Image (tube, helix red, strand yellow):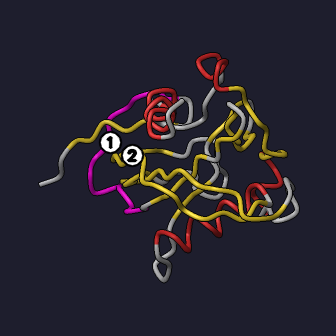
Amino acid sequence: MNKKIICRDSDNNKFEIDSNKLIFRPSVYGFLIEDNKILLSKQWDGYDFPGGGINIHETIEEALKREFFEETGINIKLLQLVHCETSFFHPSHSKRYKGEYWNCPLIYYLVKKVGGEISKDNFDEEEKGYADLPEWIDLDNIKQTKFINSVDSVAIIEKAKKLIGK
């Protein structure tokens, strides 16, 4: 028997779908916080955390290092797990994933920069169409930031800030 699932899209709109439409897509994201600012990926008309899908052959750490570098140009190391949750998500802004619905275990880590410079040179073809240079956003202004994701980004950032004593 198919279960009905409440799914959210990129603008956080809710709608109901059949569970048999879901694709399993674990994802991992990084919080790089320096000088009371967080590095965010600029996407469409808002922001998301650098990171993305974990490929079947990758560890969590490998996926985050790859995704973070692709989206920011920054090489990182993982420091501490911040948060995990499940999101039933429809990537409504994406041309590549149009019509897909995901069961996304989402994993968030504090990370540290170990090299590289902010760049968009490693974007894939789709990212070139919607993403721009990542930006440092002041943590004091985070509540006014528009996020393009299906989680309570501000609450998760607050959790990360507590872990680093901010």
| Residue 51 position by quadrant | bottom right
Q: Point out the stretch of residues depicted in magenta.
A: 12-25
Q: What is the distance, in whole Å, between disc 2 and disc 1 at their CAs?
A: 26 Å
Front residue (pair 131, 35): 35
Front residue (pair 88, 67): 67
On the image, the x and y values in percent for residue 43 come to 72, 41
Q: Is residue 160 above or below residue 120?
A: above
The type of residue carrying mark 2 is His
Front residue (pair 7, 85): 85
The type of residue carrying mark 1 is Ile
How packed mark 2 is, by other alpha carbons closer than 10 Å (few <14, some 14-19, many 20 or more), is some
In the image: residue 4, left or right of residue 151: left
Q: Is residue 141 above or below residue 40?
A: above
Res. 102 mark: none
State which tag comes first along the sequence, 2 or 1: 1
> Residue sitting at 64 percent across and 58 percent down?
96
Res. 83 mark: 2
Callout 2: SS: strand
How packed mark 1 is, by other alpha carbons closer than 10 Å (few <14, some 14-19, many 20 or more), is some
Res. 17 mark: 1
